[in-house]
Image (cartoon, rainbow, N blue to C red):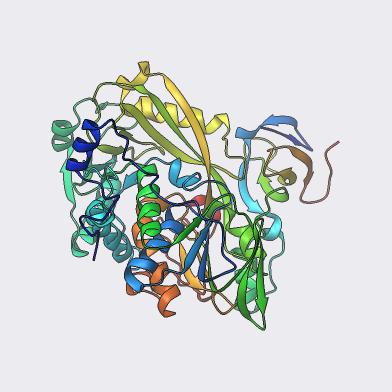
Amino acid sequence: MGFRLGKAGGYSGLRVLTEGLFGNKGWKPAWRDPAPKDSYDAVIIGGGGHGLSTAYYLARNHGLTNIAVLEKGYLGGGNVGRNTTIVRANYFLPGNSEFYSHSLKLWEGLEQDLNYNVMHSQRGLINLFHSDGQRDAFARRGNAMVNQGDDAVLLDRAGVRRMLPYLDFDNPRFPIYGGLYHPRGGTARHDAVAWGYARGADMRGVDLIQNCEVTGIDIEAGRVTGVQTSRGAIKASKVGMIVAGRSGQVAAMAGMRLPVESHVLQAFVTEGLKPVLDHVISFGMGHFYISQSDKGGLVFGGDLDFYASYAQRGNLPMVEHVMEAGMALMPMIGRARVLRSWGGIMDMTPDGSPIIDKTHVDGLFVDCGWNYGGFKAVPASGWCMAHLMATGESHEVARRFRQNRFETGHLLDEEGTGSQHNLH
Amino acid sequence: MRITCPHCGDRDRREFYYMGAEDYLHRPAEGAAPEAWNDYLHLRDNPAGVTRDLWYHEQGCSAWLLVTRNTVTHEILGVRAVDGEAAE
């Protein structure tokens, strides 16, 4: 499948050239702005990355096009529009490993598939380690990645120095021992991912309805029958809840309690600089990860603020930690000025892994619990959620993302930090 | 953000360790069904608004505190020690 060449509205280098010759008057909005119909075959609650990709793959893979995405604000205005844009497949546990591997493969074909430049850049990801124990753990993780069919290279100190000469290798507290290099890791332009999926879904007939808040979920005799919204009632026999940090409130409309606690995660961006950071780098002795955007800003983030929050703004102790970690790792960034910081609301689960599952209500599905790793999962999450909604069966790479693992004890605790929501 | 500890007074947020919602105070009886343990350990109301959660005054008196606060505004509405003594 994929994009049909020649269709009106297709994007190409030739089109950019010809539009340029004629005053760029031929560009049209990338998607329609329809009013909601009375009923659809399926409704997706949430017009973020995961909701839009689910709608896209429902249409593309399963031929379900009489569907609507309901977004209370504007498309891609939540976490997909405010994250550190890292794309990687360096997971260890069976269950996570195959899922993120699948997602990375989808990323690699995404631009051709969507006919949209999402600026996916496989610039390489390097996770640094700072002790013998950490080296062993990363060697083991690297082997798991290779066994999954992905790529990983264990770099020693000299190897890291060749690639990243600007790091503080002799920091007295946190000397750099080496790094796990994941060449296919990288970044993507976050907004473009949402827009590309939105356009792809719209072109296949999906109604993307903005400024439409879901206020209730209609359930009759254990089956979902539709939703109540700020723009009227909409009937649907299948409803997907894909609302990230707001999962608790939406699930409560269906009488559910989720294993999710919402926390704020901060990220930061500096003024634009000339190219200085060619990779994505993560510090191993503090929560700090960084890359440079194509506009030149250094984009970096840290850990949660650690207390449940919906404030979309963070507190100063974590700002301080992130800046200290950055300075400990790469003192050269000390003169860059931070332009902006922001906070996104993360749906934290007690094992740090997500949920793509049915619920106790027939026809009602849930996709949540992405913690703070949801961006790289956008393609596979949509792929697997669409598969579940269309077929009623979990996709093979998402078969462990079931809610009942919390009852049976089959947790997917990638970091091994225990059943506390804010520790993942 | 500052929290008024019933024993130590008004202190910086950095002195406190956050554990999670007050659900952790309602530990099921030994031998309870798996659903009860799931409820206790994992499932959360996760309110956008007023909540009550557990904080530990790690760098102070080592008391466990039950803090009533607003998750949208970060306003602290009340603090008491888990063993009962209220602040203010």
Q: Residue furthest right?
A: B88
Which sits in the foreground, A424 or A130?
Answer: A424
Which sits in the foreground, B65 or A258?
Answer: A258
Q: Residue furthest bottom?
A: A221
Which sits in the foreground, A45 or B63?
Answer: A45
Residue A22 located left or right of residue A319 = left
Which sits in the foreground, A97 or B87?
Answer: A97
Q: Position of residue A402 (x, y in %)?
A: 47, 72
Quarter of the image with the N terminus of chain A in it: bottom left
Q: Quadrant of residue A160?
A: top left
Q: Position of residue B85 (x, y in %)?
A: 84, 45
Residue A377 located left or right of residue A352 = left
Q: Quadrant of residue A255?
A: bottom right
Is residue A274 depicted above or below B48 in this figure? above
In percent of the image, x 50 and y 44: which residue is there?
A77
Is residue A407 depicted above or below A55 in this figure? below
In percent of the image, x 47 and y 67: which residue is there?
A67
Tally the numbered discs. Answer: 0
Is residue B49 visible to us here? yes
In percent of the image, x 24 and y 36: which residue is there?
A19
Is residue A242 visible to us here? no
Q: Position of residue A155 (x, y in %)?
A: 17, 43
In percent of the image, x 71 and y 59: which residue is there?
B25
Residue A382 located left or right of residue B43 = left
Q: Position of residue A150 (x, y in %)?
A: 20, 58
